[in-house]
Amino acid sequence: MSETATMHIDGASRGNPGAAAYAVVLARPGMPVVEEADTIGTASNNVAEYTALVEGLALAVELGVKKVQVFSDSELMVKQMSGVYKVKHEDLRPLYEEACRLRKQFEQVTIAHVRREQNKRADAIGNDALDGKPRKRGAAFLPSPLAGEGKTKTNVDDAGVRADAIQCLADAAKHWAANGVAKLPPEAVWEQLWSLLDEAGVLKKKKAK
């Protein structure tokens, strides 16, 4: 039985509508994380969010993924894809239909809503793309204490870092209790914790000791 991959996606629009980009962070068990982010011209935030889903699913298909858990901070898109909301805007319908078509190529696809702070990596690379630093399909991202070396970090106090990490674990525990581990693979929680520690500068601090 194939293992479940996790995918964080995000769409950004500066102006809504305005300059827009999508971002995908795909993690497969035991393999390097793959990131993709690029601009899509002028579009609304919702179009950017759907584009991220379509491009993310296409990437997963290309890489042979059979089961994937998708995380997005777009409540509208998640509820439309789950059938709770109807797709009313015509500019979203082609993307919605393409996402539905791609979803049929997997053994299992689940799409869950997360808070924006739990989607930091996808948000960051989407904004990087808008700033002229896209990540093309197939580029690998290897989380490590050296990630981001040379960049200026905004460090928060230790209490804030601990609070964020505890909240991340508490949210995961609640999700596991309600839905089981299969619905939220531990790898996804690890990615979130790593992102919190890396962005807070904790990993860099420890390396300097």
Image (cartoon, helix red, strand yellow):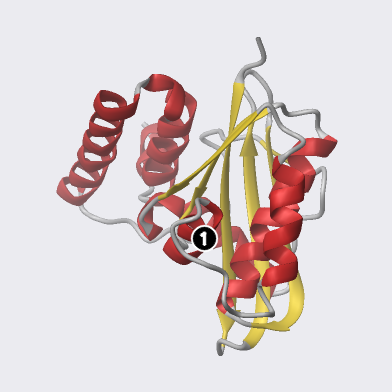
Given residues 150 and 79, the one toward you in this image is: 79
The amino acid sitting under disc 1 is Gln
Q: State the residue lying farthest toward the left.
A: 159
Residue 21 against residue 184 in the figure, above or below: below
The x, y position of residue 113, in whole percent, is 42, 51
Q: Which residue is drawn at 47% across and 63% down?
A: 74
Q: Which residue is drawn at 76% across and 57% down?
A: 98
Residue 5 visible in image: yes
Residue 49 against residue 143 in the figure, above or below: below
Q: Is residue 184 left or right of residue 9?
A: left
Q: State the residue lying farthest toward the top.
A: 1
Q: Name the residue under label 1.
A: 80
Residue 157 against residue 66 in the figure, above or below: below
Element marked by disc 1: helix
The x, y position of residue 67, in whole percent, is 64, 27
Q: Which residue is drawn at 15% across and 47% down?
A: 159
Q: Is residue 132 left or right of residue 6?
A: right
Query: Dividing the picture into quarters, in which one does residue 184 lie?
Result: top left
Residue 28 against residue 134 in the figure, above or below: above
Residue 133 visible in image: no
The x, y position of residue 203, in whole percent, is 41, 37
Q: Residue at x 44, y 58 (%)?
A: 73
The x, y position of residue 204, in whole percent, is 43, 41
Quadrant, the C terminus: top left
Given residues 80 and 145, the one toward you in this image is: 80
Q: In this view, does 77 lie to the left or right of 209?
A: right
Quadrant, the N terminus: top right
Q: Is residue 68 left or right of residue 206?
A: right
